[in-house]
Image (cartoon, rainbow, N blue to C red):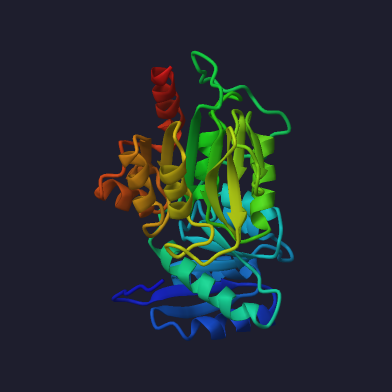
Amino acid sequence: MSFSYNKKIRVMIVDDSMLSRKIIRDGLSRYQNIEVVGEAINARDARAKIPMLRPDVITSDVEMPGMSGIDFVKSILPEYPIPIILVSSLDLRVFDALAVGAVDFVRKPDGINAKERFIESLANKIVIASCSRVRKRPVTMVPTTVAPSKLTFSSQFNNEIIIALGASTGGTEATLDVLKRLPANTPGMVVVQHMPPGFTKMYADRLDRSCALSVKEAQTGDVIKTGQVLIAPGDKQMRVVRTGGNYTVNCQAGEKVSGHCPSVDVLFQSMAENVRCRMVGIIMTGMGSDGAKGLLSMKEKGAFTIGQDKESCVVYGMPMVANNIGAVTVQASCENIASVLIRKLNQWK
């Protein structure tokens, strides 16, 4: 991924580990469009330095003494609406921080060779975050019981419709917002959310607890069926294929496509090529163009397509490109995508 900017992006590093701060500082120093303007050893230190340093983006460890990264996000955003990127180990709490307004996260490196990939990913996300729309979200806990959706279908579906959804930056919460509004008998869904391996399983489990639908991380051979959502694994390309009388998913390691693995374009293109029943494609918040061409291919094969609108996107990139090339049938806010979807499916019946 390459970017060009007229001015450098001012970054503040918040981490209680001197070694971690050094790794991030030294790594980011190689990027001409990024300037590390300061460091903080904890949340209290960061709060004191923000007015002086005026960072464009903050990177923050999730686990810090005194105040966690989650509480840091909650305390900072009302006063300083600065994009925050979390640096996290394989920790479920990263989703709590995203829920209260953090823009994105990067997984901590787990070896010497992983440091380069970590820094590259962090640098890319810093650039994306600098273009994002920061939203302070209400604090919501994952419910232990799922409230019934107020939206309903006029009749039952017998696995004759497949819904594909793709999202990136800002998508963890946007996808949740859509899924939690859908009833338990929604046609089968397949989802690509750009996310590191390991986190996709935790994300699927979190969605499963929050929605009336059943949600799981996809495995090769999983049947796409009414009432279930399959989330692409974080390090595999997911495709929809025809297997006997069913549609299933195939999840295989592969090269990045449109800059990503999993790629929304790969999923959408497989839908266009292999699915012969009715289809819906939904493209949501994220930087870049992943999914736009695939969504156009789906539309050309008769799919109904929805693009998230600019006002509700954290980053209006992927949906914008899709809309600009004519791939989007209807634009809708994150809050209205579920109702637009259900209205269309009820018309089909």
Choose between 18 and 26: the one closer to the eye.
26
State the residue lying farthest toward the front. Answer: 244
Q: Give the quarter of the image for residue 271.
A: top left
Q: Is residue 285 left or right of residue 210?
A: left
- Residue beneath the point at 67% across and 48% down: 219
Q: Is residue 320 left or right of residue 283?
A: left
Residue 83 against residue 330 in the figure, above or below: below
Residue 240 image point, x, y percent:
53, 45
Residue 136 image point, x, y percent:
50, 48
- Residue beneath the point at 55% across and 35% down: 179
Choose between 321 and 59: the one closer to the eye.
321
Residue 81 against residue 307 in the figure, above or below: below
- Residue beneath the point at 40% across and 58% down: 287
Q: Is residue 258 left or right of residue 23?
A: left
Q: Quadrant of the C terminus?
A: top left
Q: How many numbered circles are shown?
A: 0
Residue 260 against residue 40 in the figure, above or below: above
Residue 229 image point, x, y percent:
60, 38
Residue 153 visible (yes or no): yes
Q: Quadrant of the N terminus?
A: bottom left
Residue 139 visible (yes or no): no
- Residue beneath the point at 65% across and 49% down: 220
Choose between 193 and 24: the one closer to the eye.
193
State the residue lying farthest toward the top. Answer: 154
Residue 210 image point, x, y percent:
65, 35
